[in-house]
Amino acid sequence: MPSKLSRVALFGGTFDPPHRGHVAIARAAADRFALDTVLFAPAGRQPLKPEGCSTDYAERLEMTRLVCAEDARFAVSELDAPRKDGQPNYTVRTLEMLAEEMPGAAIFSIAGADSFRSLGHWREPQRLLELADWIVISRPGFLLAEPDGLALTPEQRARVHLLDAVHEDVSATGLRTRLAHGESCDELLTPSVAAFIAEHGLYRS
């Protein structure tokens, strides 16, 4: 975990598996917003995704660790690890923990456009907008829509930034389906993650 005052972005997700699309998003965000660190935080139990993941947390954490070797600005974080009490992981708590660990740092949170639009349904949305600047990933040409049920103040709107320069759109569901059928997905996975999946027989049906 970086200790000096810096510009840090939390990049949460299931990372099931982490793929080249995630790498492209993180690099584009780091370049555009002069981020010192992008923290990849594999999710534990997500309150809005009760169906869970295809692989366990330890496997997703290790694959994410391998992806983070792709860029010196990337680091893996266990802030969103499964809770011992079995309760869901809420982004607001993760951001609060990050702020406590890095006092004085400029904190960003990376989210897809669909996820950001649902922010009004997350735990403590107003607090989320207070804790971090939001980098919203969108396809080129798409306009940024406000979260459902939330009317952003001018101050909040100034802390929401659209990143629409990422052209690598990977479907995680389609990727897992291909892996389950034993297809090669080398164009979508980094070599280290592809090797890890093959070695451990992950996603095979």
Image (spheres, rainbow, N blue to C red):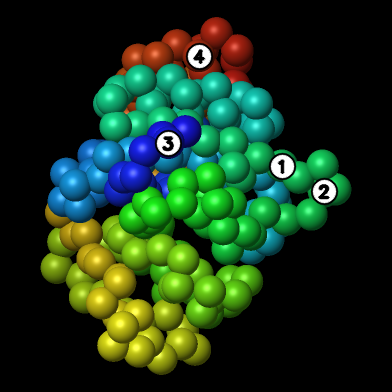
Check the image and report above or below for 97 versus 138: above
Q: Secondary structure at mark 4?
A: helix
Callouts 1 and 2 close, C-beta under 8 Å: yes
Observer-nearest of 188 and 95: 95
Residue 132 image-quadrant placement: bottom left
Residue 170 image-quadrant placement: top left
The Cα atoms of the two marked residues, 3 and 4, are separated by 30 Å
| Residue 184 in view in this figure | no
> What residue is rendered at 50% in x and 69% in y?
128
- Residue type at the position of mark 2: Gly
Say which label, 3 or 2, has the lower sequence index.
3
Q: Nearer the viewer, mark 4 or mark 1?
A: 1
Disc 4: which residue:
196
Question: In the displayed structure, does residue 81 sit left or right of residue 68?
Answer: right
Q: Secondary structure at mark 1?
A: loop
Observer-nearest of 178 and 46: 46
Q: Nearer the viewer, mark 1 or mark 3?
A: 3
Say which label, 1 or 3, has the lower sequence index.
3
Observer-nearest of 60 and 108: 108
Say which label, 4 or 2, has the lower sequence index.
2
Check the image and report above or below for 144 versus 172: below
The Cα atoms of the two marked residues, 1 and 3, are separated by 24 Å
Question: In the displayed structure, does residue 187 sit left or right of residue 81?
Answer: left
Disc 2: which residue:
86
